[in-house]
Amino acid sequence: MKRFVLVCFSVALLSVCFAVTGSAEGKMGIGYNGDVGGISLKKWVSDDWGWQGILGLNFGTAASNAVAPNDETDVDYDLAFRLFKSKDVAEKVKLNCFAGIHLEHNGSNTKNFRQTNFHIEAGLSPEIFLFENLSVETSMGVRLSMNGETVKDLDDGFTEFGTFGAGVSIVDGLCFNYYF
């Protein structure tokens, strides 16, 4: 907790020292995206158009027991790309409309359980600037998910349509961006 507070304080101090002024065009942001669970890179192409790439990695270690003797250590990943259009709705608030794709691979540390999912999503992402170049945001919208098989040779893949963004917490749904 002390490290988290120290990191937040440091980012706030840097925000004051290197404040973004004027147009958003050409600005780059780096942060954490809680929707996907990864590091985010956000680029403003113009004042109201931009893109965002997100990469999340999770290292799974093999189980060392008789139940799962063939498990292996590997990496799960999430990779997402979003295009967004932004509208200023208040002095320190932007409303981002976005559309994107999201590839997710889970269960890579278990030999007989792997799932690769592909999502097409669209939604809204209100972004609140705490400082001139530090913002928080959350996303909500709709998602078409094409989910791969969960157990090898079971062929239990499925497609579903639903919503996301029902709840926000530090780990799920809340995003931080630092612009420079």
Image: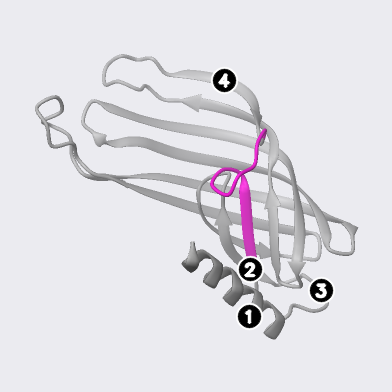
- Circle number at residue 178: 2
The reply to whether dot 1 and dot 3 touch (C-beta < 8 Å) is no
The reply to whether dot 4 and dot 2 touch (C-beta < 8 Å) is no
Give the left or right position of residue 48, taking residue 8 as reference: right
Residue 51: horizontal and vertical position, in percent? Answer: 65, 56
Secondary structure state at the residue bearing disc 3: loop
Disc 4/disc 2 C-alpha distance (Å): 34 Å
* Front position among marks 4 and 2: 2
Q: Which residue is mark 4?
A: 160
- Name the magenta segment's main secondary structure: loop
Residue 128: horizontal and vertical position, in percent? Answer: 77, 58
Question: Does label 4 or label 1 sit earlier along the sequence?
Answer: 1
Secondary structure state at the residue bearing disc 1: helix
Disc 1/disc 2 C-alpha distance (Å): 10 Å
Question: Does label 4 or label 2 sit earlier along the sequence?
Answer: 4
Circle 4: residue type: Glu
Question: Does label 2 or label 3 sit earlier along the sequence?
Answer: 3
Question: What span is in magenta?
Answer: 166-177
Disc 4/disc 1 C-alpha distance (Å): 43 Å
The reply to whether dot 1 and dot 2 touch (C-beta < 8 Å) is yes
Residue 140: horizontal and vertical position, in percent? Answer: 70, 38
Q: Mark 3, residues whose alpha carbon is within 10 Å: few (<14), some, or many (≥20)?
A: few
Question: Does label 1 or label 2 sit earlier along the sequence?
Answer: 1
Q: Which residue is mark 3?
A: 23
Question: Does label 1 or label 3 sit earlier along the sequence?
Answer: 1
* Front position among marks 1 and 3: 1
Residue 15 magenta-drawn? no
Circle 2: residue type: Tyr
